Image (cartoon, rainbow, N blue to C red):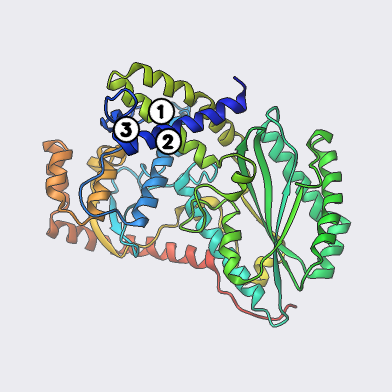
Amino acid sequence: MSGPTRLARAMHVARAHRRSVGASGSDSSGRGRPWQLVGRSSASGGGMEAEPPPLMGVSALPAAKRRDEKRALRQAAADLHPWDSGRNQPSRVHGCGRTVVGGAAVDAYIGKGTTGAASVHGVQSCARAWECAVCRARIGAMHLAEISAAADYWLDRPEGGRIYFLTLTVRHSRSDELRSLRAGLSRSWSRLVEGRAWQKFKVATDLEYVRAMDATLGASGWHLHFHALLFVSGPLETHRVKREIYERWASIVGRELGAENVPSKRHAVRLQTMKSRDQLPKYVAKLGMELTHDLGKFHDEEADEHEGFTPWEVLSELKYLRTAAAAATAADCVQLATTLNAEAVPLAAAWGAWWRGMTGCRWVTWSQKLRKLAGLGVELTDEEAAAVEEVPSALVARIPCELRKTVLHSRVILSALLDAIDRDLPLPPFIDAMLSATDAAIWHEANDPEKLARWWAERPGAFEAWQAQIAENRALARGAVVAKPRD
């Protein structure tokens, strides 16, 4: 069976199996839902934990569902990421959400934000935008805020302004190595915007831009492409501009990547007009921000057009297949486990090629003057953006340093704990049921109302400084948009 056929079949099997057991409550063997058996991940991060059973009660908050989806994808990525063999310790993605900021003697805590969903605070982030769903959503939130601010500035300028959505692609095949392809694509963009034709176009239209790299996986391998918001002073003759951009783009791609990667005239360039401000979220969501709040969908239109899948869909279905296969093995469903493991192989290969090939790639790039014109200030690095957390509106519980590994390193325990807090369920019975007697005693002592209040009061300086830094980072990321004439 060919690679594309195996990939498509694996995605189909995962989704069909998910639908069948979700609807009937049993698999084809009639043995029930085996992945409901609670498992444990191995110390090396090589195993997959089973999905934690949902608690009874009212439906989870939408914000809590999005949080849990991103945390599950982060755990799946960590399970598939090798350890740092040189130092014999986990990589950054393994420690994301598990390592506490400040050292071994510092406690993490759980707070509730404005959305009402509980979250863990005071833990480190890995800032791997191409591999970690949690960090990608946070970094995407920074880009979303800045792009929205720049668009508001541009459309509200006294001299007026228009925004267009540009897509540039190249021809690709399964034989293309992802890292080489994206490096050649980046060089092609640089040559395009540095060329004489683009500079002439820039002067004539007051052109500025925000560009993002995005990808989908299809029958011909990874489909890398650029999306860009073009900020111009007035309406463009779209057919003429598309023709001119294509002629230059095809020539550059041929030199940088080779004749086999030169795109067809039909698919190479797309230029769409943003007709109203209300369309901005639709276009910003296409900049690879499917995981950021409610802007995008888990599956985007670009994937539909190329009969492909987003990287996060690949990871989600791979996680499902591996989890279901492990639980099927535990339930003695050998044939089912063998089938699911076999279907997971091409997805695992695709995901490994993805994060290895994209690590180190810059997600969003701005033109030289646009940030200054919009009053956005210095752009945060991915590490700084991923460290920005929502300031909690209420403290719920403290995670003592003695229980850090017990709670933070177990997706089952932490997911059920956050779910209980989301539903406003009493925590003591839950803690007694989930933790050992010794661990439960440590938890209750740390979260005794008087001691918890004292613990919080003893750290006002540390928390105020931490929250002030968050506020400063958020203000820097969002910027103050001041409508002003150009120099």
Secondary structure at numbered mark 3: loop
Instruction: Give me the disc on residue 50.
Output: 3
Q: CA distance from mark 1 to mark 2?
A: 9 Å
Query: Percent position (x, y) of residue 254?
Result: 84, 39
Residue found farthest to the bottom: 158
Q: Are the residues tagged 1 and 2 within 8 Å (C-beta)?
A: yes
Q: Nearer the viewer, residue 150 or 220?
A: 220
What amino acid is labelled 2 in the image? Ala
Query: Percent position (x, y) of residue 478?
Result: 53, 67
Instruction: Give me the disc on residue 322.
Output: 1
Please say if 125 is above or below 324: below
Instruction: Give me the disc on residue 76.
Output: 2
Q: CA distance from mark 2 to mark 3?
A: 11 Å
Between circles 2 and 3, the one closer to the viewer is: 3
Q: Are the residues tagged 2 and 3 within 8 Å (C-beta)?
A: no
Q: Nearer the viewer, residue 348 or 366?
A: 348
Q: Quadrant of the N terminus?
A: top right
Secondary structure at numbered mark 1: helix
Residue ID at (76%, 73%): 234
The quadrant where residue 327 appears? top left
Query: Percent position (x, y) of residue 203?
Result: 83, 68
Query: Percent position (x, y) of residue 341?
Result: 43, 22
State whether residue 77 appears in this view.
Answer: no
Is residue 286 found left or right of 407 in the rendered image? right
Between circles 1 and 2, the one closer to the viewer is: 1
Residue ID at (57%, 60%): 282
What amino acid is labelled 1 in the image? Arg
What amino acid is labelled 3 in the image? Ala
